[in-house]
Image (tube, rainbow, N blue to C red):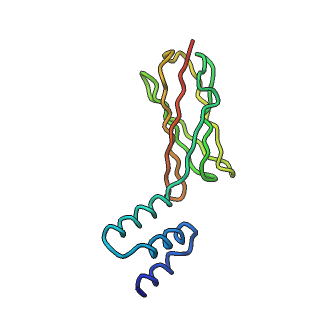
Amino acid sequence: MSNRLFRATAVAATPVAALALTAVLSVPASASSAQSASAMVQAAARLTCSAAMTNSHPADYTSTGIKVSTAAFAHIETVAHYRTVTHPKYGTANGSGKRTIRYYISGATPGYRVVVDIYVSRNGKKGSCSTFFTPHR
């Protein structure tokens, strides 16, 4: 028990580690609970990510934006999966964790749902989310 407490004290420098530490110490010692604790630490280490479209039904030859919310100054990659091409774009969140990444809709296939995958990262932590839009003529 004291060995466990020593390791926990060394890790408890951050709020996320303290939360994971609380979970680890409150779970009885066994192989399955160690795996549960590891999963909780990994989940706590993920970045939050949410996304919404500025216009989910853009007309051809107009623009739409993906509004991303994540951690402050996180790196953002968006990947739009059109019917015939995949189009990545990159950006960085502002100090509030927000960024809108614009896509110009040229002659995209009307009625085809374009899924946009969003990947965020900062200081070795990663997260992801997705949204979509459906172009029309």
- Seen at 56% across and 18% down, the residue is 106
Q: Residue furthest bottom?
A: 2
Location of the N terminus by quadrant is bottom left
Residue 46: x percent and y percent?
Answer: 50, 55
Which residue occupies 61% across, 45% down? 69
Q: Is residue 5 left or right of residue 57?
A: left
Q: Is 95 left, or right, of 43 in this rendering? A: right
Compared with 122, 34 (above or below) is below
Q: Residue 19 location in percent, x, y? A: 53, 68
Give residue 94's position: percent from left, percent from top.
67, 48
In the rendering, at what x and y percent does residue 8 appear?
47, 78
Pick the front one: 86 or 69: 69
Q: How many marks?
A: 0
Q: Which residue corresponds to the image point at 60% horizontal and 53% vertical from the top-left?
A: 71
* Residue 5 vertical position relative to residue 108 in the rendered view, above or below: below
Q: Residue furthest right?
A: 95
Q: Is residue 76 above or below residue 137?
A: below
Q: Which image quarter holds the C terminus? A: top right
State the residue lying farthest toward the left.
31
Q: Nearer the viewer, residue 1 or 103?
A: 1
Question: In this orientation, which residue lies closer to the viewer: 17 or 66?
Answer: 17
